[in-house]
Image (cartoon, grey):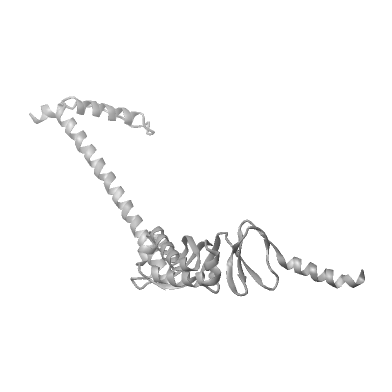
Amino acid sequence: MVAYIPFIVVVGILLFSMIKILNEYERGVVFRLGSYSGVRGPGLIILIPGIEKMVKVDLRVVTMDVPSQDIITKDNVTLKVNSVVYFRVNNPQKAIIHVENFYHATAQIAQTTLRSVVGQYEMDEVLSLREEINNKLQVILDELTEPWGVKVTNVELKAIDLPETMQRAMAKQAEAEREKRAKIISADGEFQAAQKLAEAAAVLATEKDAITLRYLDTMRDISTGANKTSTIFPVPLNIFDKLMK
């Protein structure tokens, strides 16, 4: 029985190397004597020891950060921009055979494409047209990575850092804009008040007894004020007409 122990060990090692289990999100690209044999999985995979070799490929969406880099915009402003790229492998055969390392290749092409696309816009456009830039980056990257079996599903500009001098200039511009709006609102209020006063004066001029009623109303306000020592002598308004005559 002892003599069979090495044989049993060898058989166990062979069986262990033959049987592979792939998860639902994994696929195995199998090579037979160096030649592409096919894509297998998910589930139980049996390989011929010494003849077949398998490379696992993960089909889940990968989130990749593109490092921050200096980019010169169309109007010669240097911005620090980084982004995040979401992609997945949709063709395991291409991802293994057509490119050495699809993750590294996608990261490099994402950096160069980011510089190229953002450099086509002016600074104000980069800040205001982020959605348009994201869509443009996604389309370009998807076309470039398609031969590698990679599908780019989304690209987002993560952060845009402005130079300090530009930040101060934009802060001054925003402050001036706020002061401008405040002055416009104040002037508009004064204009509306002047219009109302003009309308009131027109009414008082056309109505004979309106000025008398206004006079009496003013007397009432004065009598109910905080100063209780005031002495008021009501004078008929038409007395001035008689004096003029």
Compared with 211, 182 (above or below) is below
> Would you identify the image quadrant in which residue 221 lies?
top left
x then y, percent, for residue 220: 31, 27
x then y, percent, for residue 241: 12, 28
- Visible in this render: residue 79? no
- Visible in this render: residue 142? yes
Residue that appears at 69% across and 73% down: 50
Q: Nearer the viewer, residue 206 or 133?
A: 133
Q: Residue furthest left?
A: 245
Q: Nearer the viewer, residue 32 or 165?
A: 32
Quadrant where the image shows the N terminus: bottom right
Left or right: 4 as drawn, with respect to 227 = right
x then y, percent, for residue 171: 40, 63
Residue that appears at 23% across and 37% down: 196
Q: How many marks?
A: 0
x then y, percent, for residue 97: 54, 71
Left or right: 107 as drawn, with respect to 116 = right
Quadrant where the image shows the C terminus: top left
Q: Nearer the viewer, residue 153 or 44?
A: 44
Q: Nearer the viewer, residue 172 or 73?
A: 73
Residue that appears at 69% across and 68% down: 48
> Would you identify the image quadrant in which residue 206 lies?
top left
Left or right: 210 as drawn, with respect to 40 = left
Left or right: 219 as drawn, with respect to 153 = left
Q: Residue furthest right?
A: 1
